[in-house]
Amino acid sequence: MQFVNLLPFGLLVLIPGIILLYILKQKSEDKDVSSLYLWRETYKNIEVSSPWERLKNNLLMYIQIAVILGIILALAGPYLANSQTGSKNMVLVLDNSGSMNAIYTEKKSRLETAKEEALHYVEKWNGNVNVTLLSCNQNSKVILSGCSDTNKIKEAIYNINPTDVAGNLEPAVSMVESMAEQWDGYEALFFTDSSLNMGKVNGNVVDVSSKGMNGAVDYVSYDRGKNGSISVVSKVTNYGTETTSSDVNLYFNDKMLRIENSGELAPGESTVVYFEPVTAKEYENNKTVVIRAEWNQKDAMENDNAAYTIMRENEEQKVLLISKQNVFLEKAIGTLDHVSLYKADSMKEAEGSGEYDLYIFDNVMPEEIPDGNLLFINPKDSNITKDLFQVKGKKKGAVVNICEQKYTQMIDKKFNFGVNQYQQIEPVGKAEVFLQADKDKVGFLERIGKRQIAVLGFDLHASDFALQMEFPILMNQLLGDILQGYMLQETQIIAGEEYLVNQVSYTKEQAGIYTIEGETTKGKVQESLAVNFPTTAESSLVETVEVSQNESAQTKNVTDTIRNTRDLKTFIIWLVLVLVGLEWVIYLRNR
């Protein structure tokens, strides 16, 4: 026998109370009788000074204890598990996406509830089926395949960890469909709080969704003002089912500086919180600052109550321009903050002036490649740059188009310009192409080792590009990206998204602040990465589970998952009613 809920067993403390009532000495009553024989027991009790008397066999007491036990058992939801299932192969899919962190009951999250219910099934099967176990957020992962060892399956279920990644059950459905081809028969169980398209999968869904109050911080952003002041704004949204409000706290490196109230938000309503500007005296301007906005009200999901961003320190960057003359380029560089421009006709002329963060070679080729970030404009074929890129030849007259990259987002996608001629250039590795003529790469950015190399394959003086207002925009964004001098190209991502460290991609599945180690042109460094919760995709507590593309599939609540079992609750309730009736009859007869 197994139970749905063990809490009612706490009511067993009532049984000693019933027994106690029957060993208390009962008060004697005056009655007229024909003989004194019946008074002997009464006189014995009167002579004893204790208020207690010896416990006697009493049918009513036993019936009352049986009634209490019956009520406790009925509340505990007893059932007999059936170890048989309709298929020899079972697939358990546990959703461990961000929304599964929401509270299902007061003490358990949705994921904890799903794991508990999955364990019920495993115990019921008792090693008679082959179990394949999958976890799924935006990716699907096979944890066990065709295992019948109950203890091993239980351990694997226990070890499924929560994540803050956005959910997508499609990979799991596709994986189950693929696995099913090798089996004669199978059944799949999806433990999730999200709707899904089951396609041709033979299975059912265990619904662990829940309602509740949930406010979340969607993002926090900042803007640098005059005299080092920082303006910060944050967006908050009510993703729950009840009207709510909360204070929103602003932290700079874990130091709370501001508090603003969100005001009352109806379900689904958002607002932008504006904080009073933070002055330069309130934070360390020469260090990286972790900015955090935090929803202060306790609710059904804590993981989405904070959003982070990284404000990097202001550090002066040095740029060396090797060029005969290029006023357009000089003006574009002048739009960059915290950048000092140095000019020379050749590298020899610049000797002894120290190292630079960026070297720009405009219609000039160096005799040696300096150790730093590089920008080549209209380069010539040279053995010196063969490890960076290769010049294949020249082409005359072409229209150059913009390609979509993060540093071209501010430029109209339809923008183009003409060039008299350009160089056909091929990067040695993977490159981000931002200018293209036909299928030729005219402008690209590649990352080799710990530095960045950008190439423009034409002379700015032989095109109308420098005369367009898009030129300073592109150069500002491109050079700003190169000059940031940081290992991480992005300071904040959403949980589950990729980030690059020295051309190697990584992911983080939990929201928070991470310290990342790597190398730049300045050597080994440590940088901060902010990982935020995917609130838009995972914070809603309003959605209900719906299943499509499989008419035989059923969606069951957690209390319905004890299927193919014999429920004993109804039988026990009827038994309790019979005992109560019997007690009443005996009581009337004894009066």
Image (tube, rainbow, N blue to C red):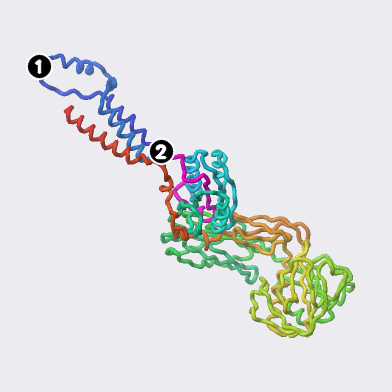
| The C terminus, quarter of image | top left
Q: Amino acid at mark 1?
A: Ser
Q: Residue 439's image quarter?
A: bottom right
Q: Residue 64's image quarter?
A: top left
Report the front residue among 32 and 148.
148
106 magenta-colored: yes
Q: Is residue 65 above or below residue 360?
A: above
Q: Residue at x 53, y 50 (%)?
A: 94
Residue located beneath label 1 in the image: 34
Q: State the separation of the CA atoms marked 2 and 1.
A: 58 Å
Q: Amino acid at mark 2?
A: Leu
- Asked if one can make out residue 222 in the rendered structure from this viewpoint, the answer is yes
**Mark 1 crowd level (few <14, some 14–19, many ≥20, 10 Å Cα):** few
Residue 509, image x, y percentages: 60, 55
Give the extent of the magenta segment.
78-107
Q: How many numbered marks appear?
A: 2
Marking on residue 54: none
Residue located beneath label 2 in the image: 80
Residue 137, image x, y percentages: 56, 55
| The N terminus, quarter of image | top left
Q: Residue at x 36, y 39 (%)?
A: 568
Residue 59, image x, y percentages: 26, 26
Report the front residue among 160 and 351.
160
Q: Is residue 52 left or right of residue 360?
A: left
As drawn, which residue projects farthest toward the front?
184
Residue 280, image x, y percentages: 64, 65
- Asked if one can make out residue 343 in the rendered structure from this viewpoint, the answer is no
Secondary-structure class at tag 1: loop
345 magenta-colored: no
Mark 2 or 1, which is nearer the eye?
2
Report the front residue among 376 and 27.
376
